Amino acid sequence: MIPGEILLAPDPVVLNEGRARTRVTVVNTADRPVQVG
């Protein structure tokens, strides 16, 4: 391995296959930013 080297899998990685999605709407009324996710 070479320092800083990135080793990738030969096939794509599927996440949450077959799982339902949820949509979330976020409203921030504060004076500071928020992060969701």
Image: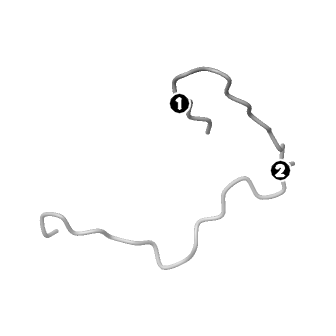
Find disc 2 in the rendering and name its residue.
19
Left or right: 18 with respect to 33? right
**SS for dot 2:** loop
Q: Which kind of residue does numbered mark 2 sit on? A: Arg
Q: Is residue 9 above or below residue 15?
A: below
> Could you tell me which quadrant the N terminus lies in?
bottom left
Q: Which quadrant holds residue 35?
A: top right
Q: Is residue 21 above or below residue 15?
A: above
Q: How is the image coloured?
A: secondary structure
Q: Which kind of residue does numbered mark 1 sit on? A: Pro
**SS for dot 1:** loop
Which one is in front, 29 or 18? 29
Residue at the spot 59% in from the left edge and 66% down from the top edge: 13
Residue at the spot 79% in from the left edge and 38% down from the top edge: 25
Which one is in front, 23 or 25? 25
Left or right: 23 with respect to 3? right
Task: Using a 10 Å C-alpha cutoff, classify the residue at mark 1 as few (fewer than 14 neighbours), some (14 to 19) or many (20 or more).
Answer: few
- For the residues labelled 1 and 2, the Cα–Cα distance comes to 30 Å
Left or right: 9 with respect to 14? left
Residue 34 placement (x, y as % from top left): 56, 30
Residue at the spot 12% in from the left edge and 64% down from the top edge: 3
Residue at the spot 68% in from the left edge and 23% down from the top edge: 29
Residue 20 placement (x, y as % from top left): 87, 48
Find disc 1 in the rendering and name its residue.
33
Whether residues under marks 1 and 2 lie with C-beta atoms below 8 angstroms apart, the answer is no
